[in-house]
Amino acid sequence: MIFLPCSEVTLLMEKRNAENISSTEKWKLSLHLKICKWCRAYKQKLEILDDILKRKLSQEEKVQINDSEIQRFKEKVVEKIDIQ
């Protein structure tokens, strides 16, 4: 089938974001997007959401945990295990 239905195209766009797609899939996706304004709109929204998520994840601060905090956590876990 040369022309994919919208339901398959949206899944293919999601797949493309998660992993590489084949050249045949790229071609079918491109063909569909040239014809279907609804899927083009979906693609734009998907790209906006991806950009927002990437920016949010890059802005989050990395939490630094020192060795003493790790040791205290381990001790508390052992205490909880011993109580039960």
Image: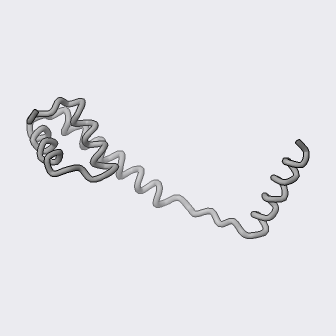
Give the percent coordinates (x, y) of residue 25: 17, 45
Give the percent coordinates (x, y) of residue 23: 15, 51
Question: Left or right: where does residue 57 sit relative to residue 20?
Answer: right
Which image quadrant is residue 8 in?
Answer: top left
Give the percent coordinates (x, y) of residue 29: 16, 42
Q: Residue at 81% of width from left, 52% of height from top?
A: 77
Q: Is residue 69 above or below residue 32?
A: below
Give the percent coordinates (x, y) of residue 54: 40, 55
Question: Left or right: where does residue 44 sit relative to residue 57?
Answer: left
Question: Left or right: where does residue 68 sit relative to residue 11?
Answer: right
Q: Residue at 39% of width from left, 50% of height from top?
A: 52
Q: Is residue 27 above or below residue 57?
A: above
Which image quadrant is residue 69 in?
Answer: bottom right
Which image quadrant is residue 28 in?
Answer: top left
Q: Residue at 17% of width from left, 29% of height from top?
A: 5
Residue lying at the far bottom of the rendered structure: 67
Question: Left or right: where does residue 62 sit relative to residue 19?
Answer: right
The quadrant of the picture occupied by the C terminus is top right
Q: Along the line of sight, which residue is nearer the eye, 35 or 52?
A: 35
